[in-house]
Every structure is written in structure tokens, then in C-alpha cells.
Image: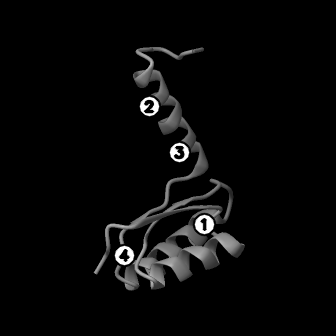
């Protein structure tokens, strides 16, 4: 069962990021794992997602591009900008 604790992992689809995501999930953390959207990476992400779900945690794995655009849009809304913001 998933807890209310979350871990944000950068580079979650491979290497140390993947190992950290799996280790933290095994300890009960829900995982938000940002990864680069690159060729061949989607298969790695889907495999990791399946492994994390099998551990019983909540999983969100946005690509870096999606995460950055979401952050930028949130900042624009925060500053009251509707079409970009230089504040």
C-alpha cells in the first residue's frame, strides 16, 4: 500500500536514478521520476513503471520536457501571466 511520502528522482529511467527509484519504492515511497524523453527511453520508463507498481506505490514518470513546460506554465499562472512571463 502506498504511503503519503513522495520521492522526486531525476534521471529515473536508468542508472543511479533507476536504482534510487526502486530502493525508495521498496521502502514505501511513492515515486515522481523525471526522465529525458529520448530514443529508446520509453521502453526503459515503461519497464520501471511496471516494477514500481508491482511494489505497490504510486508512480508518476513525466519526461523532462513535460515537467519543464508544466513548471513554466505554473510560474506564469503564479505571476499572473497568460502568454509567457519575464518576471
In the figure, residue 5 lies in which quadrant?
Answer: bottom left
How far is disc 4 from disc 3 in space, using C-alphas? 20 Å
Alpha carbons under labels 2 and 4: distance apart: 26 Å
The CA distance from mark 1 to mark 3 is 13 Å
Residue drawn at the location 32% of the way across and 67% of the way down: 4
Q: Earlier in the sequence, mark 3 or mark 2?
A: 3
Query: Is 4 placed above or below 26 here?
Result: above
Question: Which circle's residue, 1 or 3, is located before the other in the chain?
Answer: 1
Look at the numbered disc 2 and give the secondary structure of its residue. Answer: helix
Q: Is residue 15 left or right of residue 70?
A: right
- Which residue is labeled 2 in the image? 74
Could you classify mark 4 by the number of other residues whose Cα lies within 10 Å: few (under 14), some (14-19), or many (20 or more)? many
Residue 14 in view in this figure? no
N-term-proximal mark, 1 vs 2: 1
Considering every residue shown, the one lying at the far right of the view is 15
Give the labeled residue for mark 4.
57
Amino acid at each position: 500500500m502506498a504511503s503519503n511520502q513522495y520521492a522526486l528522482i531525476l534521471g529515473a529511467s536508468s542508472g543511479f536514478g533507476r536504482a534510487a527509484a526502486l530502493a525508495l519504492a521498496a521502502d514505501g515511497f511513492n515515486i515522481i521520476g523525471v526522465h529525458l524523453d529520448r530514443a529508446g527511453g520509453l521502453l526503459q520508463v515503461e519497464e520501471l513503471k511496471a516494477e514500481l507498481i508491482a511494489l505497490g506505490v504510486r508512480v508518476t514518470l513525466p519526461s523532462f520536457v513535460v515537467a519543464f513546460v508544466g513548471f513554466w506554465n505554473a510560474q506564469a499562472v503564479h505571476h499572473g501571466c497568460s502568454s509567457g512571463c519575464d518576471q
